[in-house]
Amino acid sequence: MAMPGGGEESWSDDHVASPRRGLPYRDIFDSMPDAVLVTDTDARYVAANRAAERLLGYTEEELCALRVPDVLVVPADAADVTFRRFVDEGAWRGQLELRRKDGTTIGAEGRAFATPDGLYVSVLREVGPRIGGLLGSTPAELAAIVESSNDAIFAKTLDGILLSWNKAAERMYGYRADEVIGKHVSILAPDEPRKEEIDHVIMERLRRGEDIRDFRTKRITRDGRLLDVWLSISPVRDSSGEIVGAATIARDITGQVALERELERARDQLQIITQASADGITIQDPTGRLIYANDAAAQLSGFPDAASFLAAPVDEIVGRFEMLAEDGDPIEQEQLPGRRVLAGEPSAELLLRVRTIGAEVESWRFVRSSPLLDDGGNVQFVVNVFHDVTDLKQTEEELRFRTLLLEEQAEASDEGILVMDPEGRMLSWNRRFLQVMDITDEMIRGTPREELLEQLRPSLVDADDVIERVTSLWDRPDDEVRDEIRFLDGRVVERFSTPLRDDAGRWYGRVSFFRDVTAERKHERAQRFLADASRELASTLDYEATLQRVTSLAVPELADWCSIDLLEPNGTIRLIAVAHVDPAKVRWAQELRERFPVDLAAEQGVPNVIRTGRSELHPFVPMEQMEAAAAEDPDILEIVHELDITSLMIVPLIARGQTLGAMQFVWAESGRSYDEEDLRLAEDVAGRAALALDNARLYGERDHIAQTLQQSLLPGPLPAIEGVRLAARYRAAGRGVEVGGDFYDVFDVGGGAYAFVIGDVCGKGPKAAALMGAARHTIRTAAMRERKPSDVLQTLNTALHQRLAEQWFCTVAYVRMRRATDGARLTVCLGGHPLPAVVRADGSVEFVGRPGTLLGVFPDVELSDATVDLRPGDALVMFTDGVTDEQRDGEEFGTQRLADVLRKTAGRPPDEVAGAIEEAVVAFRPNEPADDLAVLVAKVVD
Amino acid sequence: MALDVQVSGSDDRPATVSVAGDLDLSTAPDLERTLVRIQGEGRAVLLDMRGLSFMDSSGLRVILAADARARSNGTRLMLVAGPPGVQRVFELTLLDRRLEFVDGVGGQEQIES
């Protein structure tokens, strides 16, 4: 059978695009001669065809408001039970009684089956009039009924001879009554393999009095057409009850069978096609109710398959998934394409995000809904196809995300980015570009590049050069360039420009990156200045020349003008250094200073900074203010205009708490300004300059003092002691002119005894040297009066304590040595000094004496005398902490290492012992030693 | 080697001055400035020397000066001993008997009590 609107092949066509061709459900449905009623699992009617409407007298709409029990003539609960059983068994066949809309009842028979998609379809037909039931009728009535029947009705003898033939039979088979009556019924049967056998069986059953119902077979018409027929054959009895013949009710079901077959195939194909489809397909009835869904649609909605999906109550379905608009907002029911089609739109589409609740799965679906219209143009079904575009969407999303990311990166970039097309048009730029170049979007949008450059010109340093560098690149598309663009306000922008080419080498234009390196360059400049200045300051003690060079280092990068004033001993302020790139200006400044001496009481400026020791920072110096200050003197006013100061800072030169002067940085013609960071740099430099200045002055002072003290402090020749040989080492750390704090002394105290002294005065410089001299002198004097070493050091302590501020002290080891017959006796006293060592002839080493309080700090000290005997070959080794404190990588030389060295010196002359110690210390740290070093060795000869 | 000087403790309470590194001629002024400032505010000082790797007589001088300032203005100077090499300087000079050494852990409590 040809399908309405198209051939079979249309099934394999895009059934979605042309649903009316592809899904002839409704047409088929309605053209079926049998009543077809579709119910859901709840026994509710959801569809009824025309035949069903005719059978029951209800419209389909009315039926859809009813349930099976409303129509079935059995107690309602029994109807439900029946239906449930049917649902469980999946198929039903039989007879039942139905109540029509007008209240009459009607017998029907047929079958019902469950569809795979969860619906139940009943195909019913009114039970044909039974011959037996008609027996009570008069022959006339009977004849009238038979004649008027829509079904072919004919009677035959048990031999098969036709006895009657009604109008419907004439229509159906094409034979007139007079043509067939008396003929054998076999003329109606086509030739079939088992034709006679079947006829025989039928006749046998009739003879036994059995009805033959629902017999489907083939019949042939007069003109040779094959018919599918439905037969109901009943035996006809005579008044005595004997079976004399048979009455046949025949109905042409050719169309129905074909339709059923087609429907079956259509259903199968639909099933195959839709189930095979990854797209979800659903069909809604005009009320919006879902009557069909494939597995994909079910899974999309969170169900394992279509059957469970369609069987699920609406509430449950709704809770399984949600449909969101593209932007993620919930979507209104009315917006769904199916609803829109039901509302009358010819077709509707929508991109949906379907989120299966609980499964964390989200898919993108392109939903297209198309209506199936009936002949009257009314929507009968809506087919919704949920095309899975998740992959596509994800790719698109990813692309969009990447693009967004790129844009964000470009925007978030610390670099300004400008893209030009091959024609040199500025295509795109980020906000940072505008910031870095200090231009507005309006300035650049639609502006030719030449014009933009001209707009920038007034703010550029070396504008001609910059513009030349930029424009020359336009003719060299292949060139990559990195350079700097400097602005008059101090900004420095690094430009990196590179051609844009694709993989094939096609040129797309140029991209340039602009990075604000102002802070970096400033920091670099500052560091360079600091390093250069520090080197200068350390290079010489000629501080005036040094300071002049330091000011020169500051211009022009850190100042247009830089100068240093020093506070003179008489309280005046003297300009000792001034720098400007133009030497003429330097001379002019010096002349100015002579003409207009500094007002020492000025509340601002250099005198104030020197007086208070506090820096001044004037980021912006308003010309009006300068003019106002100079208003009374036209000469000064002229100078003010000439100087054109825009910003200045003055920092004090402070060393050891004393303000020595001030350093001034001025921006003038370059129009820049100083900030807090600049001020910190200036203070740093000033601090270093002050220290250098202080040192230089100090060195001058030291030179003088050191020379006078040298004679008395540096050890003279050691005395000759009978039976004892002496050796000493002395080395001052640091510069040659600097007198260290270590000292030693050996002298005769009378009575055959000698004093061995080694000491360390804390600190360096003149004051330490003076203290050392005093200590040495005091010890010598006291040693003449006191025998006990502890008494000598007690005297020294008292003398120092009375003379000195408390933090000044010295440590002293005092050893009195008296020759004995076999060696010597030592009395050792230590005032805060490291214990001396005794190296025995056998190489053993011991440290002798007991620690005592350092000297000069406390009025009372704890000192003790310890006695040690030396035998021939033993040596006393006294030293200062310059030996043991010597450091390398955070490790001290230490007494242990000293003992190791001494052990190896056993038996060697004292000079070699002293030499070994010095060598070991030097080897321990080959650099210049950090501290003074003094060693005194006394060895008893053997 | 440099000296790291860290000060902790609020303004009205004893200050803990932690020194780390080398306390010698070149770095002693750094510590001295810090101590002068804090003691100038009339605050007691807990000098934590556990981080010191070296100390010479210059360091000793700074500590003695601080001790003198503390005694003259009625505040306290407490010391948390450094490593043995550093502590040896105090032992040799018997300053371990003259200065107030406290436990590193309990020092803050002692100074507040």
Image (spheres, coloured by chain):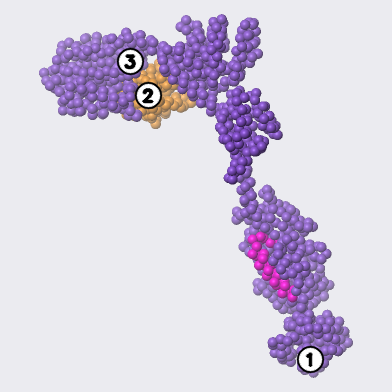
Q: Which chain is purple?
A: A
Q: Position of residue A575 (x, y in %)?
A: 51, 9
Location of mark 3 (residue): A736
Q: Is residue A416 left or right of residue A227?
A: left
What is the chain identity of the residue bearing mark 1? Answer: A
Task: Please state which of the two labelled residues, at mark 3 or mark 2, is closer to the viewer.
Answer: 3
Location of mark 2 (residue): B23
Is residue A272 visible in this depiction of the protein?
Answer: yes
Chain coloured orange in the rendered structure: B
Residue A372 quadrant:
bottom right
User: Do the CB atoms of the residues marked 3 and 1 lie less than 8 Å apart?
Assistant: no
Q: Quadrant of residue A111?
A: bottom right
In front of the other: A802 or A282: A282
* Residue at image coords 66%, 53%: A353
The three-letter code of the residue at mark 2 reads: Leu
Disc 3 marks a residue whose amino acid type is: Gly
- The answer for how far apart the CA atoms under marks 2 and 1 are is 138 Å
Residue stretch rendered in magenta on the structure: A258-282
